[in-house]
Amino acid sequence: MKDGSVQTVKMRITSDQGSDVVLIVEPWGMEFPMDKEESLEVVFSGPSGDCPEFRVATGRVELFGWTGSTVSVYRGGECIYTTE
């Protein structure tokens, strides 16, 4: 329901395929290489009524924000990218 409220979606992405993976955050076009067994936390915040979209392909994970959303990416608890 779109009522002007804001929602926050937090997720942990872990590379456990035994090889390196690239996390791509769209529509900002940011790429974050991930070593084997490394985790990144991604926090989206934006208008209620929509959600992030995932696409998984060999060697990469793509996350798409929604209209009006912002994103922050954390590695080891440290913010390494934000659109806020």
Image (tube, grey):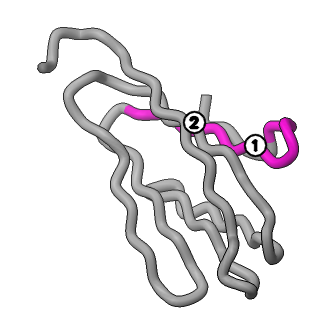
Q: Foreground residue, 36 or 70?
A: 36
The reply to whether callout 1 and callout 2 are in contact (CB within 8 Å) is: yes
- Residue extent of the magenta highlight: 69-79
Q: Secondary structure at mark 1?
A: strand
Q: Main secondary structure of the magenta part?
A: strand
State the residue lying farthest toward the top.
4
Q: Is residue 35 magenta?
A: no
Looking at the image, residue 54 sits to the left or right of residue 40; the answer is: left
Instruction: Kindly report the distance in space between the C-alpha atoms of the residues bearing marks 1 and 2.
Output: 8 Å
- Mark 1 sits on what residue? 74
Query: Quadrant of the image for the C terminus?
Result: top right
Position in image of residue 46 (x %, y %): 39, 26
Give the residue drawn at x 74%, y 57%: 39
Bin the neighbour count of mark 2 within 10 Å (Cα to Cα): few under 14, some 14-19, many 20 and up: some
Give the residue drawn at x 67%, y 62%: 14
The amino acid type found where label 2 is placed reads Val
Find residue 43 and name its label.
2
- Image height check: is 67 above or below 7? below
Q: Is residue 72 magenta?
A: yes
Q: Tell me which numbered mark, 1 or 2, is placed earlier along the sequence.
A: 2
- Image height check: is 19 above or below 41? below
Position in image of residue 55 (x %, y %): 39, 70
The amino acid type found where label 1 is placed reads Tyr
